Image (tube, rainbow, N blue to C red):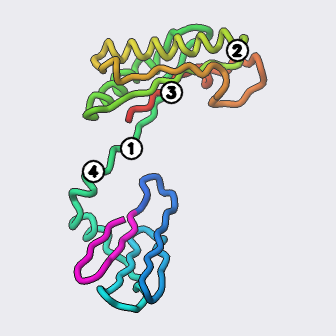
Amino acid sequence: MVGCSTPGTRVVLLPQEDGSPSAVTVRTKGGEQLVSQPFQQATAPLGSDAPPKLGQADPNEVRDKNKELFALVPTKPQRFDLFFDTGGTTLTADSVRALDSIIATALARPGADITVTGHTDTRGNTVDNDALSMRRAQEIKQLLVGRGFPADRIEAIGRGKREPAVSTADNVDEPRNRRVVIVVR
C-alpha cells in the first residue's frame, strides 16, 4: 500500500508478490471504500466529509515515484530439488550438475540463507528414513559449505518419508521422493 497526504490522502493498493488477493478499507467521515484490486486507489480530500473516491493508478507512475519503497521488496525465495540414488546419500548425475547453479544463486544474494530439507521414499521404517533424510540434508549442507557458502546460514532438516513429493503406498521405491529441497532466501 502506498499513501501520501497532500492535500488529502491517497491510498494505492500494491499487488502481492505471490498473486494472492489483498484489500484495505479507506474511511472518512463521509463513508468508506474498499480498495481490492492492484493499483486501485482511493482519494480523500483533506477536511472533506465526502466518501473516498475510487480510481486506478498508473503502475509505472507508482513505481517511478516510490523507487525507494520498491527497492526494499525482498527477492522471492528460490527452490531447488536434488535427487538421490536408492538408500543412500549419493546424488543423481543431474543433481550433481545442478549444484553449481544453486551455489551461484545463493552467493549472488547478499545475506542469503538456505534451508536444506531431506526426504526419503516410503521404503523402510520411519526411524531409518528419518536418519537417512537428515544425513542427506547434512551432506548437501557440507557440499554447499565446501563451495563457499557460510555454514552458519544453512539449516539442515530431515523429514523422512512424512512429506512425499509423490504420494505412494508404504514400501514403494519412488525416485522423486528421494530428495532434498533447497530454499534460498
Secondary structure at badge 4 equals loop
- Residue name at image x 34 percent, y 20 percent: 152
Secondary structure at badge 2 equals helix
Image location of residue 166, percent across then percent down: 67, 30
Q: Which circle's residue, 3 or 2, is located before the other in the chain?
A: 2
Q: Nearer the viewer, residue 153 or 94?
A: 153
Q: Amino acid at mark 2?
A: Thr
Q: Which mark is residue 76?
A: 1
Instruction: Name the residue that disc number 3 marks.
Output: 181
Left or right of 32, for residue 68: left
Q: Nearer the viewer, residue 137 or 30?
A: 30
Q: Viewer-nearest of labels 1 and 2?
A: 2
| Pointer 4 with pointer 1, Cβ within 8 A | no
Instruction: Name the residue that disc number 2 marks.
Output: 126
Measure the C-alpha gap from mark 1 to mark 2: 33 Å
Q: Viewer-nearest of labels 4 and 1?
A: 4
Q: Which circle's residue, 4 or 2, is located before the other in the chain?
A: 4
Q: Which circle's residue, 4 or 3, is located before the other in the chain?
A: 4
Image location of residue 39, percent across then percent down: 38, 70
| Pointer 3 with pointer 2, Cβ within 8 A | no
Q: Is residue 110 above or below residue 144?
A: below
Crowding around mark 3 (Cα neighbors within 10 Å: few <14, some 14 to 19, many 20+) is some
Q: Amino acid at mark 1?
A: Lys
- Residue name at image x 49 percent, y 17 percent: 137
Left or right of 134, for residue 70: left
